[in-house]
Image (cartoon, grey):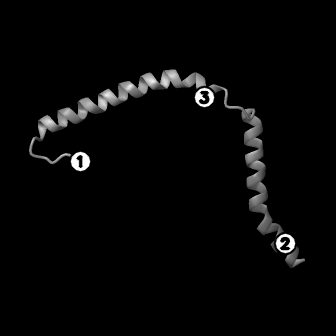
Amino acid sequence: MVELLRSLAILACPVGMGAMMWFMMRGRGGSSQTAPAQVPANSGELARLRAEIDQLQAAQRDANPKASPR
């Protein structure tokens, strides 16, 4: 009886993890059709953020001319 309870306790974690993964995939529908539609919107935001980073780095270089670049 003790061995049965120990075995159930050991198997509870992997079985529960597998069940959660299965339910999460079922809820999403198992497809990634939304990813390509988001790429154009994200590329514009990525370009804007890169430009903002460049501006901030230039302002930091201008403010601290003696600091060494990273």
For label 2, count other residues whose C-alpha is less than 10 Å away and answer few (under 14), some (14-19) or many (20+): few
Q: Which residue is mark 2?
A: 5
Pick the front one: 20 or 66: 66
53 sits left or right of 44 in the view: left
Q: Position of residue 17 (x, y in %)?
A: 73, 54
Farthest residue toward the right? 1
Displayed quadrant of residue 37: top right
**Which residue appears at 78% of the width and 50% of the height?**
19
Q: Amino acid at mark 3?
A: Ala
Q: Which residue is mark 1?
A: 70
For label 3, count other residues whose C-alpha is less than 10 Å away and answer few (under 14), some (14-19) or many (20+): few
Q: Is residue 7 above or below residue 57?
A: below
Q: Position of residue 70 (x, y in %)?
A: 23, 47
CA distance for labels 1 and 2:
57 Å
* N-term mark: 1 or 2: 2
Q: Which residue is mark 3?
A: 35
